[in-house]
Amino acid sequence: MSLRPALPMRPRHARALLALLAISLALGLAWLASSQWQSSSSRTALERLRADATRLHHLDALLLHLLDAESSVRGYLLSGNPVYLGPYQEGGAQIAQTLDALRADDWRDDGQRAALARLAERVDDKLAVLARGVEHGISPGVEAPAGGPGKQMMDDIRLLTGELRAATLAEIDDSLVASFARFGNARQLNLVLGAGVTALLLALLVALWRQGLLREQLGAMLHSENERLQAEVEQRTAELNSLATYLTNTREQEQARLARELHDELGALMTAAKLDASWIARKLPADVMAPLRDRFDRLLDTLNQGIAIKRKVVNDLRPPLLADLGLVEALRSLADAAAIGDREGRIELDLPEQAPDLPADTALALFRIAQEALTNVRRHAQATHATLTMRVEPEAIVLRIADNGIGFDPARLGRARHGLAGIAHRVQMLAGALQVNSVRGQGTVIEARIPRPAA
């Protein structure tokens, strides 16, 4: 089972998603820009309409102020009461302000400004006529059949005002038409952009959904592959453990065979050689034996050393105390075998009086664990004190070896730590648990917890 055919699809999907996101972002920005343009255009159109409406108001106000002034003068001339001159007197300033406001308005072309100039001239002329009438008491326009210059001026003012109003209303109509056209275009553009963004979002959702399906498929494939690999690892681990157990048992059997052959064959030969040398020394005459005494003594001493070395080798290969006296005495022999450190330090023992009945392989494994741990202490720890402890608990047997050596970092154990690996394997063979605690400069504690076999 391989994941290679599915993996190359992911970059293409990622590029497609990025393209959709980029297009969606571009359309979204275009939509925002369109909305901003529409808002700005609408604001400009409204400001223009407000200006045009203000201009209409100014034109109407100018005409109204002139009519009020003329009516005020007529009332004064007819009644002779100065009270009627109030609107005329106030109207002059209002007319001037209105003309200034009209001049300040935003006129579209020069023709309108020229018409406004003519209107201002006619208004000034009209005000002059009204002023002469008030001053001389002559009613404006009564001296001519057609109403005189006062009426003609007012007609011109109405005509010019009407023209300016018509132009302003035409501008308002044009602004409204243009605004409606812009609104229509903006509406269509918004519809197009909205439809595009919606379509892209739908496409993005579909792409994300497909990517989710692909991710689920990849996850399922990875999960299946991981399960297969895990099963394969477990199988290989079981095979390696089985092989290591077989090799360990084979080595113990081979050591036991060598121990038996050394004890039975080599031990018998060396003992016979010692007995023969002693018999020869006794049978030779004293005068013959005298010059050979040193040689015979060195021969007997060499044979005794050979027998001692043989016994030590046999004990290392297959400890006889383990089979003869039990696990506790075998562990005591480890403490007596050699000292630790440069100061001939001893190993402190904390052992029970008697160990429970254990199968031979369990007792041998516990002995080998203690033997290997103490060997590591002597070779590598540079310790001056060590403790060997065995506790018998209701459910387990706990073997603990502690020292005050240089320690090490358990997280950086290399492959060369075969001693600890062998200890861990023996603990694993007995379904136990191994705990190694060590800090540089603070010593090491190795604790093996072995379940007690059922009775």
Image (spheres, rainbow, N blue to C red):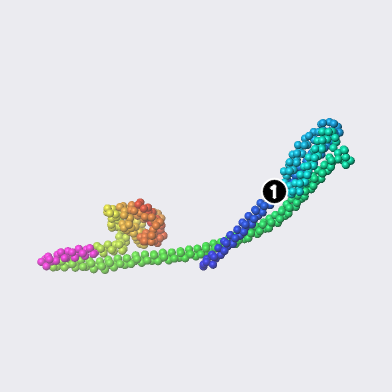
- Main SS, magenta region, reads helix
Q: Quadrant of residue 289?
A: bottom left
Question: Which segment did they paint magenta?
Answer: 286-307
Which residue is depicted at the point 78% across and 40% down? 124
**Image x and y of residue 408, in percent:** 36, 55
**Image x and y of residue 50, in percent:** 73, 45
Which residue is depicted at the point 74% across and 48% down? 110
Q: Quadrant of residue 98?
A: top right
Residue lying at the far right in this picture: please name it. 145
Residue 449 visible in the displayed image? no
Q: The residue tagged with tag 1: helix, strand or loop?
A: helix
Q: Amino acid at mark 1?
A: Arg
Which residue is depicted at the point 50% across and 63% down? 226
10 Å crowding of disc 1: few (<14), some (14-19), many (20+): few
**Image x and y of residue 286, in percent:** 11, 66
Q: Is residue 343 left or right of residue 18?
A: left
Is 292 in the magenta? yes
Residue 175 visible in the displayed image? yes
Q: Is residue 260 left or right of residue 43?
A: left
Q: Quadrant of residue 6?
A: bottom right
**Image x and y of residue 30, in percent:** 64, 55
Is 11 in the magenta? no
Number of numbered tags placed on the structure image: 1
Q: Quadrant of the C terminus?
A: bottom left
Which one is in front, 74 or 51?
74
Which one is in front, 199 or 70?
70
Q: Is residue 200 left or right of residue 321?
A: right
Which one is in front, 269 or 142?
142
Q: Which residue is mark 1?
A: 43
Q: Is residue 402 left or right of residue 285?
A: right
